[in-house]
Structure formats: C-alpha cells, structure tokens
Image (cartoon, grey):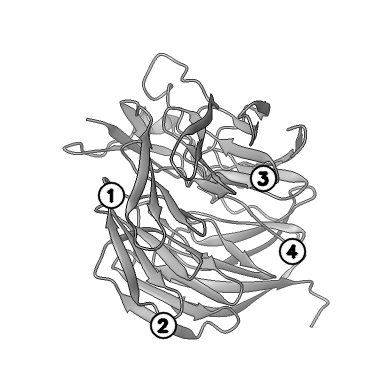
C-alpha cells in the first residue's frame, strides 16, 4: 500500500487505506506557527466582492483554486458546484451542479473549465454557460489542476501517471508512469504545457518532459534524490506546480531543492536547498518559493542566488506566492492574506478573508487578487496606496 502524508501547519499526518491519523514525533518537538507579526502597512486593501461557491472542504487539502480569463473568475467546491463570476463585481454568470466530488481545478482555456474529482474523473464544462462538454474516467484521486493546450489536457494522478487527453472529447491519448515511493506526500504536481512539450514532476523527485503528441520521452532529471535513513527523511516529492518562463523550467521538491532546468535538454542550470511542497511562482526576474516551513524566498531567475528571505510567517502553512504589481500575495492557515514587497520581502499589507484556511494559491487578474478559502467562500481584493482614492 502506498501511504500518503498530509502536512498541516507544520504537522506530519499519515493517511491511507486502513490507516488512522497520527502525529509524528513528540508533540513538544513540533515547531508551532508564529503569531501574526507586527508590520508597517503600506497598502489600502479594498474588498471588491465575496461569493459563496459551495460547501467547505476543511482539512482535505484539495487542489481547488480559482482561475481567471481576465474577465471572469471560475471556481468549484467539493460538493460539486462550479461557478463563473464577473471579475469586477462578483456577479454570478452561471452556476452548475455537477453532482461530483470536485477535488482540483479548474484550469481554464480554449472555451473549457476543467476540473478533477476525488473518484478519478476529469470534467470539462463550457466556459460560456457551464454546460457539460465531456467527462473522462482516470485512475485515482485528482489533487492538482490540469494543464491545457489547444489540442490536449494533461493531468497527474496519484498513482504516478501523467495522462494526456484529447481536449475535444476527453479520450486518453497516452500515459506514462514513474515509480511511486512507499511513502509520499498527499498531493501531486500540476504539469505544464509549452509548445509541443509537456513537463511534469513526480513523487520520486524526478522532472520529465514528453512530446505532447505521443508521449515520447524528451528528457528526465532528478531534482531531489532521496536521502536519509527513514521513509520520512527520504521524501522527495515534486508536488509544487511546474512553472515555465521562456526556456527555463522551475520545480521544487520536499526535503530537497528548488531548481531551474533547461527546457530543451533538462540540464539543471542551478539549484538551491529550498524545500517546498506549497509551490512557487516566477516572473521575468525572480523565482518566489514558499518553503516547507513557510518562509518566502526570492531567488534570481538567472543564477538562483537568494535575493531575500522572509521568515516572519514561520509555519503559518502559507500558500505559494503570487506576484501582483510590485508585491507578492500569500494566504495562510487562519484565513489571512498577506502582501509582501517583491523587492525585499517586507510585509506591507494584511487582511482576513475567512476564518478557515486558504490552501489554494491566490489568483491575480490585472490588479485584482482572488482567494478561495476552505469554507468554499471566494473573495476579491484590490490593493492601493493609502493616499490614493
């Protein structure tokens, strides 16, 4: 039996068929989350709207996150409800009851909003009206958003496979498999598609690129070799979404490294000992990572050198950071949303969006930040300087 680990606010929890939950190590040795730090506010945070998407999914660590096409925001809830709302005012454009246990997504593109489910299905809805376009059965729980191109939908499943489906009808075109260690984290990495290549991360610490048309391996490399004496110490999952900027691939692993790889060859261009399962983001100058202890780290895109580290939110179970204007946005386990100065990591703004955790990475469209809490409530904010009106 493959056992999967939950990591919540610094605690390791084991889950699996027939396994009860337990804490690893003695409770006195657990590193607790820090209280909310003091900071000097430099932003006025305006709440634009708040919408109830559906029932909550507390403590399930699902891959449900809002998505936007620049005019609308799309989201789903574990109870099967999917919605599209206007980005500026939150007005519901459509709402669809799928009657499925949604667990990941949506990913939006080419007229589709694509979700994954807890019982192994990929569901495509029409972005115009929310009507069902197709459903495809896959193996295992889907815990990460898919990637979409004009021809294909690529998804990672928990049993170690990368599957590529035809975007027109959901028929599987091909799949490849990587071995799964005995013990892994709960979660999978979202693949990325660029041109005729799909890149995916796996639970064995590998990142691999495949031809989108037929699945032929173009390259694979080990981002994080398993090290240590125990199964927990040897965890090396690449669970953070794969990011591609220009010709560079970025990936992070747990108990391992954050690395930049060449898209053409898979050669590791640089790596840093920054462990992460929360995720990363990148712009044209820097890579931003939330480490496994909720430190936000900025690294140079070209060299990997660390530009700054923000440790004031230690163990607050931060989401991956999202760039917006000249800042970064992260959510935490108590429903707070934090703004950081992208140039130096200083805390510059904070608001509480909900009383439940924000697990999904915030989404940005223009200057609007959208967050989805585990309660199923979605909220949008716009930041401005205190002097502006």
Secondary structure beneath dot 4 equals loop
- Answer yes or no: is residue 312 visible: no
Of the residues tagged 4 and 1, which is closer to the observer? 1
Q: Nearer the viewer, mark 2 or mark 1?
A: 1
Q: For the residues labelled 4 and 3, say whether their Cβ atoms are less than 8 Å apart.
A: no
Which dot marks residue 138? 1
Classify residue 87 as left or right of residue 172: right
Alpha-carbon neighbours of circle 4 within 10 Å: few (<14), some, or many (≥20)?
A: few
Q: Badge 3, how many Cα within 10 Å: few under 14, some, many 20+?
A: many
Q: Is residue 181 left or right of residue 214?
A: left
Q: Are marks 4 and 2 in contact (CB under 8 Å)?
A: no
State the mark number for residue 288: 3
How far separated are the C-alphas under marks 1 and 3?
A: 32 Å
Q: Nearer the viewer, mark 1 or mark 3?
A: 1
Question: Which of disc 3 and disc 2 is earlier in sequence?
Answer: 2
Rounded to the nearest angstrom, the CA distance separating label 4 from label 3 is 22 Å
Q: Quadrant of the C terminus?
A: bottom right
Q: For the view shown, which residue lies furthest in the front direction?
A: 214
- Looking at the image, tell me whether mark 4 or mark 2 is earlier in sequence order: 4
| Residue, far top | 229
Choose between 87 and 371: the one closer to the eye: 87
Q: Quadrant of residue 269?
A: top right
Q: Residue at (24%, 70%) from the top-left corner?
A: 99
> How would you rate the neighbour count of disc 1 (Cα within 10 Å): few for under 14, some for 14-19, many for 20 or more?
many
Earlier in the chain: of badge 1 and badge 3, it is 1
Q: Residue furthest left?
A: 18
**Where does label 4 land, which residue?**
41
Disc nearer the start of the sequence (4/3): 4
Mark 2 Cα shell of 10 Å, populated few (<14), some (14-19), many (≥20): some
**Distance of mark 4 from mark 2, alpha carbons?**
37 Å
Residue 346 falls left or right of residue 229: right
Label at residue 94: 2
């Amino acid at each position: 039996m493959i056992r999967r680990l939950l990591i919540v606010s610094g605690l390791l929890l084991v889950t699996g068929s027939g396994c009860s939950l337990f804490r690893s190590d003695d409770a006195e040795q657990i590193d607790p989350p820090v209280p909310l730090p003091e900071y000097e506010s430099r932003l006025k945070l305006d709440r634009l709207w708040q919408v109830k998407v559906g029932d909550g999914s507390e403590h399930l660590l699902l891959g449900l996150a809002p998505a936007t096409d620049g005019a609308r925001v799309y989201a789903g809830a574990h109870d099967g409800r999917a919605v599209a709302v206007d980005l500026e005012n939150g007005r519901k454009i459509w709402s669809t009851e799928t009657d499925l246990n949604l667990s990941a997504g949506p990913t939006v593109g080419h007229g589709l909003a694509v979700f994954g489910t807890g019982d192994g299905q990929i569901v495509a809805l029409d972005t115009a009206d929310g009507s069902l376009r197709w459903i495809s059965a896959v193996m295992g729980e889907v815990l990460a958003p898919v990637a979409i191109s004009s021809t294909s939908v690529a998804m990672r499943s928990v049993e170690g496979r990368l599957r590529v489906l035809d975007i027109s009808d959901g028929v599987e075109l091909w799949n490849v498999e990587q071995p799964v260690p005995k013990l892994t984290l709960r979660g999978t990495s979202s693949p990325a598609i660029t041109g005729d290549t799909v890149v995916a991360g796996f639970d064995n610490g590998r990142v691999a690129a495949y031809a989108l048309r037929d699945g032929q391996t173009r390259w694979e490399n080990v981002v994080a070799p398993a090290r240590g004496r125990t199964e927990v110490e040897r965890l090396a999952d690449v669970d953070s979404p794969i990011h591609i900027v220009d010709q560079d691939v970025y990936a992070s692993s747990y108990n391992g490294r954050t690395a930049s790889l060449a898209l053409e060859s898979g050669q590791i261009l640089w790596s840093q000992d920054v462990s992460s399962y929360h995720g990363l983001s990148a712009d044209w100058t820097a890579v931003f990572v939330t480490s496994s202890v909720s430190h936000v780290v900025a690294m140079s895109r070209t060299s990997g050198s660390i530009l700054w580290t923000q440790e004031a939110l230690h163990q607050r179970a931060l989401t991956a950071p999202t760039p917006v204007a000249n800042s970064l946005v992260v959510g935490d386990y108590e429903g707070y949303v934090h703004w950081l100065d992208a140039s130096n990591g200083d805390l510059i703004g904070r608001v509480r969006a909900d009383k439940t955790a924000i697990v999904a990475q915030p989404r940005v469209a223009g200057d609007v930040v959208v967050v989805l809490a585990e309660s199923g409530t979605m909220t949008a904010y716009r930041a401005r300087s205190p002097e502006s009106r």
